[in-house]
Image (cartoon, rainbow, N blue to C red):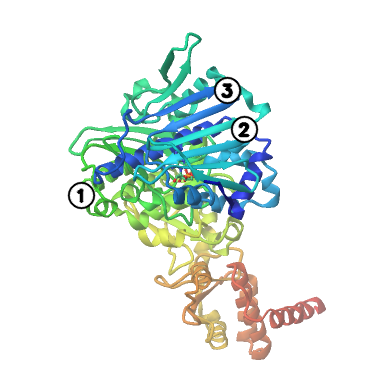
Amino acid sequence: MTAEVHSFQAEVQQLMNLMVHSLYSNKEIFLRELISNASDAVDKLRFEEITNHNLLKSDKENSISIRMDKENSILFIEDNGIGMSKDDLMNNLGTIASSGTKKFLEKLSEQDKKDSNLIGQFGVGFYSAFMVAKKIIVESRSAHGAPAYKWTSLGDGSYTLEESAKETRGTLIEIHLKEEEKEFIEDWRIRGIVKKYSDYVTYPIFLIETKEDGQIEETRLNKSTPVWARNKRENKPEDYQELYKQISMDWKEPMLWEHISVEGLVPFNAVIFVPTEAPFDLYTRDNHGLHLYVKRVSITEKCKELLPEYLRFISGVVETDELPLNVSREILQQNNKLPQIKKQIIKKALSSLQHLSTSDNEKYLKFYQTFGAVLKEGFHFDYEQHESLSELIRFKSSKTGKEGWVSFKEYIERKAEGQKEIYYLTGPNFESVERSPHLEDLTSRGIEVLFLIDPIDEWFIMSYAKHGEFNLKSINKGDLDLTGVGKENEEEKKNEEKPVEELVGLLDLFRTKLSDEIKEVKISKRLRESACCLVADENGMTAHMERIMKATGQGMGGVNKRILEINPSHSLIKNLADRKNKGTDDTTLSEWVEVLYETALLSEGSPVKNPGTFAKRLTKIMEMASNK
Ligand SMILES: Nc1ncnc2c1ncn2[C@@H]1O[C@H](COP(=O)(O)OP(=O)(O)OP(=O)(O)O)[C@@H](O)[C@H]1O
């Protein structure tokens, strides 16, 4: 039978060009990728074997073997796993199977493509073998029994398919090494690579060598028990690092790992990892989860039932013997043992983060800057963990400066005299809240204000209104009574004693003039330097929240009116009150009132309704002032 010629899908060709022309120095990872595929194939076989007794049998134990033909520089990697039919070969090795790889390719800019290190960071599976191969032959027979097929490619845009005489189930891959990559035919090199990357692989990896006397020698290269099932003391840091690379496709070292062995009611072993950097799909990923094994059989790679969404940056492996082997993915959702394992995993993950925060604060803050916003989602979804989560979150504040951080604990330790609430201000970024007029009185009293500047914070605060005995109090919402809190302020005392009658006329003017825009005008207790500011009702929506709602298409129209607070000791307010009381023409005063309101809008980061009119009014007022 003649071979059929097929073209690769465009993206595959793109990926292969990347591989073939890659200057990536860590080419040895190709073997890790092929071994990982072989191990997956045996996993799949074992999983299917439980329910399907008609699969082709193998006379060897489930394993992976590596052989070399030194004379012709060919490396053979063979497994007796599930194998591939002709269609499988076309679908798996002619298109891009993994959607992650596809996204990776889409994400690569032209500039990035020149950065060969990305290859290593991502781990691009089977095709990485083209970094070292001038030709690859894959002979495979599906365990379902269809005839075997042979796939051949030079990595040049096409591949051929023809029937093969292979009788045993599984896959045999021939890597015809490029002239300059012959180091990979040396057995010391192969031993080293397997040890380095694939020591944890569940199935035996054999090196098969023909000795000078013709004897065939089989040496097992990997350890027999996977990392998670061994005693912690037997494992070296490198064991965990390698396991991480295998399961996460992340080339960077993990930031943190935790080996969990639980004996109780539902015994299980697990290793969980926190990455150093955020995966590109951290906010969009819906395929988070842990790799679940039951009695060494891989059940599913992303078991969502084992990990809450707010810990979706964690990857890892869980093995338990407490589930039936033939557990289907649907049954997993109803299984009552998984929630118990999940609970333990959450507990361990949070406590190991807590431990990191006390043992290496710098490293913890790096973690927090990368994953803190995701962690905060937990306040909404996991009431039970509020206490542990509250120990883990950090804030910028009026005292930390832009680079610093403060925890709830530190905040409370340095609270001001008489302080019974935790004060916070929400906003889109540090700059916008740092100079907010709402801070003035608090700052002058030496009271620290937390800056809630993550987009998620408005939701966080809805789910977490109290920390211990301290209510969390927004400083731009409702009344703010700071009597007796922090440093007493002489200025403040004077204000309180001051009669407000002289402001009545001006307040009325504000009310009539701005009745469409604001809910109320009040005398402020929170201002020192600014003439006025806007605040939300106790239960109302802050300007920041309103902007978020609008951005997410849930605008509230004109319904959400705020309160304008004016500073009775500000000379501008005093002058305006004087003018009003002396009966100055309302139309001129109205202009001032409008401009004051508009500056309050600008200082909270909101746009003015009509910038052109605002500019004209301001110019007119400046002109009047300059004439004096
Ligand atoms: N030894 C093998 N036995 C059976 N199927 C295999 C084997 N090697 C590869 N495959 C099939 O080819 C597919 C593509 O492999 P490839 O390594 O490119 O991607 P992947 O393993 O799915 O994803 P990743 O990008 O995560 O490595 C696999 O999903 C699998 O279905």
Question: Quick check: can you spot residue 574?
Answer: no
Residue 427, relative to residue 500: is it above or below? above
Q: Which mark is residue 185?
A: 3
Q: Position of residue 177 (x, y in %)?
A: 61, 30
Few, some or many residues within 10 Å of mark 1 (<14, 14–19, 20+): few
Q: Position of residue 25 (x, y in %)?
A: 64, 31
Q: Residue at x 46, y 54 (%)?
A: 285
**Front position in the image: 25 or 473:** 25
Q: Position of residue 19 (x, y in %)?
A: 63, 41
Among the two numbered marks 1 and 3 on one chain, the one whose residue lies closer to the N terminus? 3
Residue 21, relative to residue 259: is it above or below? below
Disc nearest the viewer among 1 and 3? 3
Report the number of numbered marks.
3
Q: Residue at x 50, y 63 (%)?
A: 493
Task: Give the position of the C terminus as an image quadrant.
Answer: bottom right
Which residue type does callout 2 highlight? Answer: Val
Report if the beta carbon of the residue with label 3 is closer than 8 angstroms to ligand 1.
no
Residues at marks 3 and 2, CA–CA distance in whole angstroms: 11 Å
